[in-house]
Structure formats: structure tokens, C-alpha cells
Image (cartoon, grey):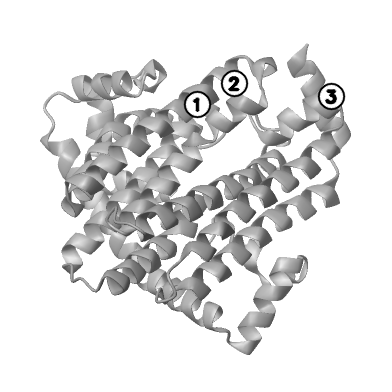
Amino acid sequence: MSNKDESVFSKEALMGTQAGKEIMKQGLLRSKGYRQFNQYKEKTGNEFQGFADRFVMSLHKAIAADDNPAGTICKFAEEVNSPELVPAGNVTDIKARLSSPEDLGDRVKRILNSNFVKMTFPVFNALFDGATQYFNNSISEESRNAVIDGHIIAIDLSEPMDRIVDKDEDLEYLEDYKFMNPYILAIARSKIAQGGDIVLKAFEEGFRDARVGQYIDVKLKIKPASISDENMTECYKKYRAVMGTAGRNMALNRRPLGDIFHLGMAKAGECVGCGNEIEDAIKNNAVKVPSWPLYFAINTGDVRRGFELTMAKSELYLDEAKIALDMLPESFQLKPFLEFLFLTVRHYNQHWYNELVRRAPFEEFQQKIEKLMS
């Protein structure tokens, strides 16, 4: 299993959850799902650095070739309707700093250290291979890598954007991230376009939906008391649209697998989003704004109950993701992989919930929420 915090999938951690125990059992029995998943985990270990190197090289080349970075950044900020993504510092100085491959490589390494990136890299490889086998078509290794790389890079774009908005990580590098954002998006688009017009079209539609979710997220940060189930559902487009679109395009936007992958990845992404909110609450010693734990805590008046209901919400998302498994054609060879994947998602959420209960910071969290709402 791949995760930002590798201890989440340690033997001790796996023993602490029902899903983790099932993972260990399948590992001992060498189940088909375990073997398929382990194959792509090993593939990730062998190929992830190559992907990172390609990313840094493309980014360095794009930055060096741009004679008007200030204009590029302003155009990007306007496209995503986020003026706060324009650097406050001197753009020329930032460009000079990031012209160093070492410094640029450091920033890329930081934003690639993301649960969504690490958890999805092996998944996208598996989905792409499964779709290629199902449709019995051939595609060059270059085009395959381009489509997968492009979607991983697009997902990775959410990392610097979230860190800029949340201001909870890498504070000394936020200006650099603001500078890098438009080039990251341009590289993602260029690579995804190699999959064809229908693949690029699906990406652009998903990216627009993701921006809606990001916009609502920012608005709720400014006015947390306005949180509701409806705007939280809209906010979660930032997970649903990006992950679902990536799933769709691993089948090059072809039915039936394109629709099935979209459903499974979108709902799995939302499920992981719930676990991520619990992990962030522990890391930041406060309930995240906005988040499902905040919504439930405000409406029940009980922070602990808020996290219990967030876990229930995550299970609903995962149940929807599992519907995708029942839609898969009988000839699709990687269904056991996906079943095992969803087991790892459930363990991830259970692990962080158990850790929260063990620490029991609920009274402190309640006080912070009351202050926030006053």
C-alpha cells in the first residue's frame, strides 16, 4: 500500500482495524486481489521516480521558456477565479530561484508527497492496463505514460493550491507554488491531450467542476457558519470531479469502462476525502474548515458524534464505489485489484478514526468550534 505516512500500513496499524486484518489475511493467503495489487505497488516503486523526473524536467523547460511569467500567472489566476494565487513577491526573483533544477526538484518532491498522488499512481496504471486488455487495443508506451502522467500531475496541482489556501503546510514555499501552478496545469493538459480530443474534453469538463468545488471550499473557509449538506456536497466536487475524470480517461473515455471507472474513482475519492479530514484534524489539532466533521458537529452539538457520522458518510461513499464493481464486465481481469483497493481505503479511514478516538481531543475541538461560530 502507498501512503504519505507509510506507518498507516505497518503491521501494527493493520492489526488495529477490521479492514487491516482482512488485508493481512489476504496477504498470507496470497489472494488474487493481493497479488494484483502488489504487482502494481512494486511497479510504482520502480517507476515513480521516473515519473517525478519527467515532471521536473517538463516543468523546468516550461518555466525557462516563458518570457512573461507574470502574465502567465495572472491568466491562470483569472481562469480558476482565485486572485489569491498571484504571488505577492517579485516574480523575476521567484523564476530565478526555480530555474535551479535542485530547488525546483525539491518543490516537486514536496507536492508529490500527497496521499492522493501516492494512492492513485498504482491505481491509474492498473486501470489503464485493464482497459487496454479489455478493448484489445494497442497504445504506445509514450502515449500511455503521457495520459497517466498528465492525470497524476493534474491531481497534484490540488496540493499547492490547497496549501496556499489552507496555509497549514510549507509556508516558506507558498510563493514558489503560486508561481508553479500555471505551468503544472499546462503540462497536465499537454500530456492528457496525447490521449485524443475526447480524453482532453473529459478532462476540461472535470477540471471545471473541480474549480467549482474549490471555489465553494474557499467561500466556506471565509464564512464557516454557512456550511450545509448541499454546499459540502458541492465542495466535494474537488475530489469527485478530478478523481472521477481520471478514472474515465484511463479507459480513454470509452464505454462501458469509462463510466464504470468514473463512478468507482469518484466515490472512492470522496471516501478518502473523509479520512483525510480526520487525519488533518489530528495533524492540525482542530476540526478542518470546511469538512464533514464540522458540519455534523455543528448540527449535533457533539464533536465526537460529528466524527462518528463522518465515518458513516465515508461508508456510504464506499458503498457507492462498490456499485462500480458490480457493473464491471465479466471479462475484466482486474476486478480483484479494485476489491483489494477499496479494502485499503476502508483501512485508511478506520486507522485515522481510531487514532482520533485514542487521542480524544474532543473537548478542545468543541471549544474551537464554538469560538469559530461566535
Residue where numbered disc 1 is placed: 165
Using the image, determine if residue 354 lies above or below residue 207. below
- Type of amino acid under label 1: Val
Q: Say whether disc 3 or disc 1 marks the residue closer to the N-terminus.
A: 1
Residue where numbered disc 3 is placed: 367
- Type of amino acid under label 2: Lys
Residue where numbered disc 2 is placed: 221
Q: Is residue 363 found left or right of 76 in the rendered image?
A: right
Residue at position x 23%, y 44% from top? Answer: 200
Secondary structure beneath label 1: helix
Q: Say whether disc 2 or disc 3 marks the residue closer to the N-terminus.
A: 2
Q: Where is the C terminus found, in terms of image quarters?
A: top right
Q: Which mark is residue 149?
A: none
Cα distance in 3D space between marks 2 and 1: 9 Å
Q: Residue 292: tell me if it is visible.
A: yes
**In the image, residue 346 lies at what x, y percent?**
66, 59
Q: Are marks 2 and 1 in contact (CB under 8 Å)?
A: yes
Q: Are marks 2 and 3 in contact (CB under 8 Å)?
A: no
Q: Is residue 336 found left or right of 260 in the rendered image?
A: right
Q: Residues within 10 Å of mark 2 (few under 14, many from 20)?
A: some
**In the image, residue 331 lies at what x, y percent?**
40, 76
Quadrant in the picture for residue 47: bottom left
Q: Residues within 10 Å of mark 1 (few under 14, many from 20)?
A: some
Q: Say whether disc 2 or disc 1 marks the residue closer to the N-terminus.
A: 1
- Type of amino acid under label 3: Gln
Residue at position x 80%, y 31% from top? Answer: 365
